[in-house]
Image (cartoon, rainbow, N blue to C red):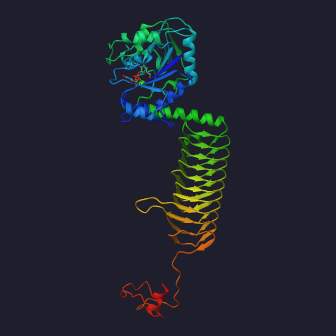
Amino acid sequence: MVAVAILAAGKGTRMKSRLPKVLHELGGRSLLAHVLKGAATLQPQRQLIIVGYGSDQVRATLAQPDLTFVEQTEQLGTGHAVQQIIPYLQGFEGDVLVLNGDVPLLRPQTLERLLKTHQDHGNAATLLTAQLAEPKGYGRVFCKEGDRAVPHVTQIIEDRDCTPEQRQNRRVNAGIYCFRWADLARALPQLQTDNDQQEYYLTDVVKLMSPVMAVDVADEQEILGINDRLQLAAAAKILQTRIQSTWMSAGVTLIDPHSITIDDTVQIEPDVIIEPQTHLRGQTIIATGSRIGPGSLIENSQIGENVTIQYSVITDSQVQAHTKVGPYAHLRGQVSVGQGCRVGNFVELKNSTLGDRTNVAHLSYLGDTTAGTQVNVGAGTITANYDGVKKHKTVIGDRTKTGSNSVLVAPITIGSDVHIAAGSTLTENVPDQCLVIARARQVLKPGWRLSGTPQQPSIAEPKEPEPRLEPQSEPQSELQAEL
Ligand code: UD1
Ligand code: CA
């Protein structure tokens, strides 16, 4: 039986942030979510999260039925934090894995190895350690002399409490521990605050237990603790390298990987090509054969097979197979684009659905619109969906063609097989199969000129008297009739 307890009550003073430290984001997940994801592989019976600073926010962000939140109202140290779980694990027989909420890069295999060593040796406690070239800031782990494969730990001393000589020790405490619960529950109440910070240190329990062993991590990057924004950026870089290696090994081409970012939450099928300056975020899925970028941002969106997207921003949307998007398109707020469509240059789509083989190729805005299949939305077509108070819907039937510079004033329904003349402003519904023209007719007045101006007005003579609109060859009344 394994329980997991995650320390997440600290404010994270060095982050200089209003957000609790464990909620800071790293590759699309909070620090705490990374730690939980790692712990999940051990299939723990119980998951306890010790919260304090910003606890409402932490609870709200991670509301999951299988998590128990334990309140640490005052942050009196890591030992004090773990003391808070005692009432929750009364009678628990098994091991408790204690994880720091600010150590997000641990691999599940490392946790499995820690647990296995702990159980194989029947230890009271086993902790994860690393031998660092630059151990500054970490607690130092002191072991018994002798070259055992798994060293026995005698004590842990915080960096600030070390003598200069002790500080030379390069073996550091990762803040990741496995405890036999019965032993830990016995040791916790005995902790004292006789240290530089006057805090209850969890690390002091190792002096009260036996045997305690140390397991060195193979890759020291895994134990990086996030205490400030510099460490957050360093962790982001390490995580990005891992994510990109995973996808490249799985058959995804990344062109100029350093300019690309991919969240930990994204899924990509083989034979996708990601071009430079492209960022894939959130719950995004890219199907095989698609080519994304250069210069694109895709967030919480599903992209079908063989889709091309260039210099575009797509959020909370779906694009189906064989569609081309961009350059310079913006899809947002639940857009669904069918198969074999073209969404082109300088087009914005919001909360709209396009059927298969529909094109919106140039300079258009469609908002709250449902367009059928094989619709051709002409250049500059705009749905006027907002009357200043409410948003209204536009419906466009199959195979309808909107002329260039059409304005569809919503709410409005345009039938199927409709041709809309260029420059039309439609305010009323249009039935199927027709041509609709809703614009002022072109009026041509042969030989007309402004009265009081010479036959061939010259820009060199700007000081002419204010001209009066008057037809040259027709009486005023006739012009009015024409308009
Ligand atoms: C801790 C360890 C140190 C180790 C390092 C690894 C102790 C005394 N020291 O130091 O040996 O090398 O982690 O990263 O444990 N927290 C609470 N309640 C509290 C205090 C802290 O929940 O009262 C939480 C924090 O939110 C954080 C974690 O415990 O997630 C670690 O606390 P932090 O102050 O960062 O400890 P370090 O000084 O890094
Ligand atoms: Ca820390």
**Residue at the image position 52 percent from the left and 21 percent from the top:** 45
Residues 368 and 270: in front is 368
From this viewpoint, is residue 451 visible? yes
Say if 19 sits above or below 156 in the image: below
Ligand 1 positioned in quadrant: top left
Q: Determine the image quadrant of residue 118.
A: top right
Q: Disc count in the image?
A: 0
Residues 172 and 53: in front is 53
Q: Determine the image quadrant of residue 373.
A: bottom right
Residues 170 and 204: in front is 204
| Quadrant including the N terminus | top right
| Residue 307 in the image, given as x and y percentages of width and height | 64, 50
| Residue 253 in the image, given as x and y percentages of width and height | 65, 41
From this viewpoint, is residue 155 visible? no
Say if 180 sits above or below 263 in the image: above
Say if 383 sits above or below 233 in the image: below
Say if 384 sits above or below 199 in the image: below
| Residue 249 in the image, given as x and y percentages of width and height | 65, 34
| Residue 278 in the image, given as x and y percentages of width and height | 56, 46
**Residue at the image position 65 percent from the left and 56 percent from the top:** 356
